[in-house]
Amino acid sequence: MKKFQKTAIAAAVAHVAVLSSTAAWAQTSSDASAAANEPAVAVVHISGQRAALQSAQKLKQDADEVVDSIVAEDIGKLPDRSVTEVLQRIAGVTIDRNMAGDPNRQSVEGSGVSVRGLTYVRSEINGRDAFSAGGGRSLGFADVAPELMAGVDVYKNPSAEQIEGAIAGLVNLRTAMPFDYKGFKGTAGVSESYSTLRKGAPSPTETILLSNRWKTDFGEFGALIDFAHAKSPTRSDGVGVDPYWPHVNSTDPALYDRSQTKWIPLGVGYRSQQFDRTRRGDYAAFQWRPNKDLTAALTYFKTKYKEDLDEHVVSSSEDKWYQQVASADSVFNSNGAFQSGTISNPTYGGSPFNSSQRINTRESSTRDVSLNVQWRATPDLTWTNDVQHVHSTTQGFDADVSTGFIMPNQTMDMRGSVPQITLGSPAYMADPNNYYWAYTQEAVDHATASQTAWKSDVKYAFDHPVLRDIRFGVRMANREGVNNKAQPFYNWQAITFPWMEGWQINHVARLGDPRFAGGASLQQIDNFFGGKYNLPPMLFADEATVRGFPDQWAKIHAYHDVLCAEKGSSCTPWVASSFTNPAATNSQNEKTRAAYTQLRFGWDDLKYPIDGNIGLRYVATKDTGSGYVSFTPPTLNLPTDGTPVSGQENLINIAQFAQRMSAENTYHNWLPSLNLRMKASETLQFRFALARSMSRPDFGQLQVQTTLNATTLQTTTKSADGKTTSVHFDGTSLAGNSDGNAMLKPTTSTNVDLTAEWYFAKAGSLTFSAFSKNLKDIVTTQAYNYTVNDVNGKPQTFVVTGPVNGAKGFARGFEIAHQQYYDFVPDWLKGIGTQASWTYVESGRRLNHPVFSAWCQGNDASSNYNLYINGCDTDARAFGNTPLQGLSRHTINLAVMYEQHGLSMRLAYNWRSRYLLGVTQWGSRGNNGLNTNPDSGAGRFLIPTTNNDQAFGLPLYQAPYGQLDGSIFYDFTDKFRVGLEATNLTNSYTRQIMQQHAGDFTRQVFMSGPRYTVLAQYSF
């Protein structure tokens, strides 16, 4: 892996060095012989992607700030299939290949945009605020129709006149306006995509744009409409490996030898996810110019998307890792880590597993209506007013219905690029008597957000040798949002499990029992991992059952009620999530008032001319919010079969409640900025930028919402045949989680940029940028005590964790970028060009109150900072020194382009080095680790926990990933073109790595397969 990383970096550096020197040689040779050879110089036709590169380069060269752009060849002709994928082509910009906030599921089109390693990214549409409902401050770029875009700009160190909020960078999506065209403009396009893994799912895209302008007695009018509708069905298959557990040579402290530990994975599994995204974009723009000094523009922009995920998951649910054994022929490496063999749990007669069907749906929309009026009052004075209203909604439903079974054994081989697993014979997996109904879980939410903003800007131009113009303005914005969550997290509810047997039910609800057979069926996952695995048919809940929430769910939970009645026990009936609880609602309001002034200047008469701007922005922010602090007591299930129970006096009894809260916070920020540019020649220039910037906390971090919870601690003793013989209640653990903190301050940063830019041709440049960002008031988590009286009036203390401004940090590095078309090559190669960029970023974070202990202890309560910040292994050793989440040190882009005689081709490769996904992600965390700390005491040292009080959370990394995409287009006429686009041509796998002290192990490997799109576009 390291060898490949070095090779990729070396290739990028070599490309930049060799090709830039080639460019210099070509330019020098051309200049030296220009007079002699002028009549023989060939004329190169400039159009298509070359013209787009020229436009983007011109924007970068002439900009007042440090900016990179991508310009569409024509409307609907951005070089990738989504805005997210377009952004990754810009130096310093990276995207995540996992679904937002969920590394267990792959995002085929990418998600989570970062700029220079940081996620404090602000989004705009045509220079105006843009966001999606649900708690964030940015727009979901993957949900915006790329067919509507005319270009994308990334400002890496914004100036005072730009709206605050972009520490990492500002991403501005630009749409076309009717006055951009000389007259009538029309385009229509269609496309159809094909996924080699998903195969036959239809995926059409249709776009149409119509624009025209007219001169009348009332002035000039322009109108433009643009519609896009796209279906994008994809599929992703994954193979997973659970964390490795320490099987010690002896539980006797005197005989224990850590070097003799065997590390065995808990289990393996797989998942297959079919994802359907329907994206619709509607855009209209109207312009009016009654005279040369007055222009008005009205725009309407709406993006709407619907996503539907249907997933089958087979995963281990083993709860007693210490009873697992490896076969005699198993292979271990030098660190004692399992490599290949068979694993089983003789106590269970195999290994417990779940087969789950999950449905996740979401519908979201964002609508922006804006009016802009620009008046040139005098030749030197321009006044611009802009009014905007944004309304955004989202609603989601995430559901999982699972069956359970005992897998006789797991055979696996971890030595290849993809783990090889065998989980059961076709006959065994098809027998309904081997399955039982296990659990359901659901999460339901809906949110709305709206904003009204007014901005007024004045620009006065000087007739002066140094002063260019002065700009000043104000902006006022009022934003409000309401978030509704039926549950703080998933509403996980058991149906039947083997651990219920003997004290609550006599046996589980097996699918072979006619009473419990409804709602599931035998299902086959075809072409898994492109045919590399042959999975047998298995029983999963029917799709209709999962989507039939809540009625169908009530039917399968009734199976548990039948068994409870049969046993004569008292069981709590299932209750579906709903919004009836007032604590489900959280509302927030934010008012911002900003003012700025900015002076542009320049010394053109110097030997090396210097120009730039200096400015200051002031912004006042007032946040108010309301929500609830709530508590729901845990359900206490007592055995009804006479099993001895003790320790009830240790339990804490607090009544359920929901209490309304409100909060208000006001803060002020001064944001100075300086941008300087020195022109060493017409083609060589240098920039220096210094600015202070801020990023407000996401609205999700500002929620006024605290959820208190209690966990009953108990010890269950079982006989050799697995029957419960006694239950002892050890006490009640009181904890809580504050979803937000309305008193949070914004994160601030001092940003420095230094660039060198050589523009040796209209579409040829070599640029270097060094940058540094020093951050303050980074949001982290911290614990505090919250006291509530129990039913006897006695105060009880909850340990609650919530976000605070608790750290400082930095991100610094450099970017090198090169692009060029080689017009000096032989005629048959004319039209070939290349692009390359390399970004290096290093970062660090320092907590205001550092938390580190070499050993981990306690459960996964949110107050366990050693766990959540440093990470803990399954043997209780802590990690620490984890990097900033989501940051790759190296990012590389390489592209080869060709455009000649109507033929346009491109191959583009993007690669980023590994980066941290988190330290407590689902699937690589738990509460049943082994304490190997010699100082933990005789009752804990080397003793497997039965109380789930030894938490672990492994640092989870995304492995280095590179993807090759390509396209080829042919213009049959200057109005009609057809093309083929290909994504992930080399079928690259995404891999996740979990860090443990015994080594770095594969957590999951995902495959989505190549995708191809056929396009046709007609202009008229």
Image: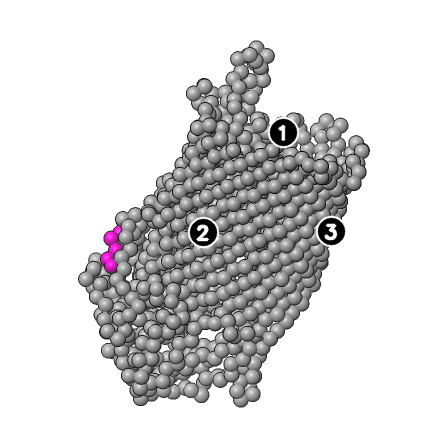
Q: Which residue is mark 1?
A: 684
- Numbered disc total: 3
Taking 968 as reference, is 889 above or below it? below
Q: Position of residue 977 (x, y in %)?
A: 45, 32
Q: For the N terminus, which image quadrant?
A: top left
Marks 3 and 2, Cα distance to the nearest angstrom? 38 Å
In percent of the image, x 56 and y 87: which residue is there? 793
CB-based contact (under 8 Å), mark 1 and mark 3: no
Q: Which residues are magenta?
A: 533-537
Residue 556 appears at what percent x and percent y?
33, 73
Q: Is residue 972 above or below residue 947?
A: above
Q: Disc 3 designates what residue? A: 474
Please name the amino acid that badge 1 sits on.
Answer: Leu
Q: Looking at the image, what colour scheme do you see?
A: one colour
Q: Amino acid at mark 2?
A: Thr
Label 3 vs label 2, nearer the camera = 2
Q: Secondary structure at mark 2?
A: strand
Q: Mark 1 and mark 2: span between their CA atoms?
A: 46 Å
| Snapshot quadrant of residue 967 | top left
Q: Which residue is mark 2?
A: 278
Coordinates of residue 344 in the picture (x, y in percent):
25, 65
